[in-house]
Image: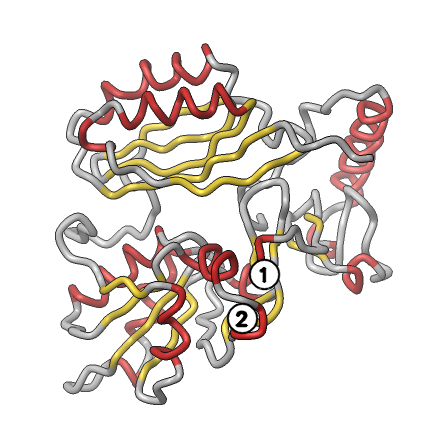
Amino acid sequence: MESAPRYLTAALYKFVDLPDFEALREPLQACCEAHQVKGTLLLASEGINGTIAGLEPGVRAVLAHLRADPRLATLQHKEAWAHKPPFLRMKVRLKKEIVTLRVPGLDPNKTVGQYVKPQDWNALVADPDVLLIDTRNDYEVAIGSFQGAINPNIKTFTELPAWLDAQPALQGEKKPRVAMFCTGGIRCEKSTALMKMHGFEEVYHLEGGILKYLEEVPPEQSTWEGECFVFDERVSVGHGLQTGPHELCRSCRWPLDAEDKASEHYVKGVSCAHCHDQRSPEQKAQLAERQRQVELAEARGEVHVGAHMPGHGPR
């Protein structure tokens, strides 16, 4: 029998005023290292965002350290379990934004859209007068989305403002009702704040994101189609947050299903149909060698430090 998963992953974020965020970095890094917790946490004046993983007592200790700050006392997190450590290092980084949108003056701590609980989401988006917008990147939308959702076909979140500005349906004097969603909720905080900044009064976003919806809404009542891309070792999840069938291309990090891996352009660790023509022969040779070293390390029961772990989208 397969042993129970040992490693706890905690994904978290909170928009909150942290003018002293730089001073928080070293104590937080030290706490994570003391408890052998790894991952990435971002600190900015607007709040905190990131994912950490490790043995359960260590992760709980880091979460307690964060919540000891009164400003983070209500910090929420989402949990997942893994059989292998999903991260190799611990990084606490100082950033201008905890999720980058590059819109001056935008502050989700002051103005944001209206939360909609997963159980109420279907009724809202069933209204034909509501525009349903997927705020995620193209490689995420490619493997799943809500029925009827508009796909902006953006490669990065920073492209969303320009896309919104180019939509005729959003430019009239009479502003439509808009519902927006993302993986865990953080991008929707900023995107709905952006809509409010532009004069939209009725703006909604899915509380807890797609992940909370898949966790709480039964499949027979769901309007979700496909899988949800996640930025950790699972790659994708479905209803009940069951791990999906996707793997990452270790060259470009595009999520691949069985059909993708059946492509003539797929070479494990080297290329896939999305990137095979973007790599030189020299690069492919280097990737092949890296894959060989990864497999040798796995045979020894080790994790190869050169292996790309999930956490970022396609390059």
User: Residue at (38%, 76%) from the top-left corner?
Assistant: 132
Q: Quadrant of residue 45?
A: top left
Residue of label 2? 224
User: Residue at (28%, 68%) from the top-left corner?
Assistant: 204
Q: Earlier in the sequence, mark 2 or mark 1?
A: 2
Q: Residues at badges 2 and 1 in contact (C-beta under 8 Å)?
A: yes
Q: Quadrant of residue 22?
A: top left
User: Residue at (28%, 28%) from the top-left corner?
Assistant: 67
Image location (x, y in percent) of residue 42: 36, 33
Image location (x, y in percent) of residue 207: 34, 58
Quote the CA–CA distance across marks 2 and 1: 9 Å
Image location (x, y in percent) of residue 108: 20, 52
Q: In the rendering, which numbered label is found on residue 239?
A: 1
Quadrant (top left/top right/bottom left/bottom right) for the N terminus? top right
The crowd level at tag 1 (other Cα within 10 Å; few <14, some 14-19, many 20+) is many
Please determine whether, in this image, residue 194 is positioned above or below residue 310. Answer: below
Q: Is residue 256 left or right of residue 103?
A: right
Q: Quadrant of residue 228?
A: bottom right
Please determine whether, in this image, residue 126 is positioned above or below residue 160. Answer: below
- Identity of the amino acid at label 1? His
Q: Nearer the viewer, residue 83 or 220?
A: 220
